[in-house]
Amino acid sequence: MMRLGDAEYVAALAETMEILRRWAREGRTDGWYKSLSETLKAEGHRVHYRGPIISHLLADACRRDSQGASPCSPPS
């Protein structure tokens, strides 16, 4: 079972950020919790769209993104 801060969570967080950045570049507006959960599951991360972990992943992704470059900005 995934727990906050464990290796599985960190990997899922990195994938969540990549997914959200890709969706932003694509201009997607259909990225609901269920879509994110299904995409994460396809990448091997067991995250249920109604579970608490997805909320933590999104909150952590927002915090990390707000402290760094925007999702659409090229790397420096």
Image (cartoon, rainbow, N blue to C red):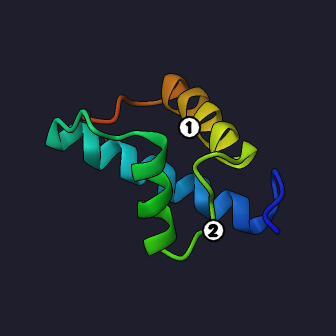
Disc assigned to residue 46: 2
Name the outermost residue toward the top.
66
> Which residue is nearer to you in this view: 28 or 25?
28
Which residue corresponds to the image point at 33% horizontal and 35% vertical from the top-left?
Answer: 71
Helix or strand or loop: what does disc 2 sit on?
loop
Residue type (three-letter) at the residue carrying disc 2: Arg
Helix or strand or loop: what does disc 1 sit on?
helix
Specify whether 74 is left or right of 1: left
Res. 25 image quadrant? top left
> Which residue is nearer to you in this view: 68 or 49?
49
Which residue corresponds to the image point at 16% horizontal and 43% vertical from the top-left?
Answer: 26
Specify whether 26 is left or right of 52: left
**What percent of the width, then of the height, locates residue 76?**
31, 40
Residue type (three-letter) at the residue carrying disc 1: Ala
Image height of 40 relative to 63, above or below: below
Mark 2 surroundings: few (<14), some (14-19) or many (≥20) residues within 10 A: some
Specify whether 3 is left or right of 41: right
Mark 1 surroundings: few (<14), some (14-19) or many (≥20) residues within 10 A: some
Which residue corresponds to the image point at 54% horizontal and 29% vertical from the top-left?
Answer: 62
Specify whether 37 is left or right of 76: right
Front: mark 1 or 2? 2
Res. 54 image quadrant? top right
Name the outermost residue toward the left.
26
Q: Which residue is mark 1?
A: 61
Disc assigned to residue 37: none
Image height of 7 relative to 18, above or below: below
Which residue corresponds to the image point at 60% horizontal and 27% vertical from the top-left?
Answer: 63
Q: Does label 1 or label 2 sit earlier along the sequence?
A: 2
Which quarter of the rendering shows the N terminus?
Answer: bottom right
Q: CA distance from mark 1 to mark 2?
A: 17 Å
Image height of 67 relative to 1, above or below: above
**What percent of the width, then of the height, locates residue 51?**
70, 48
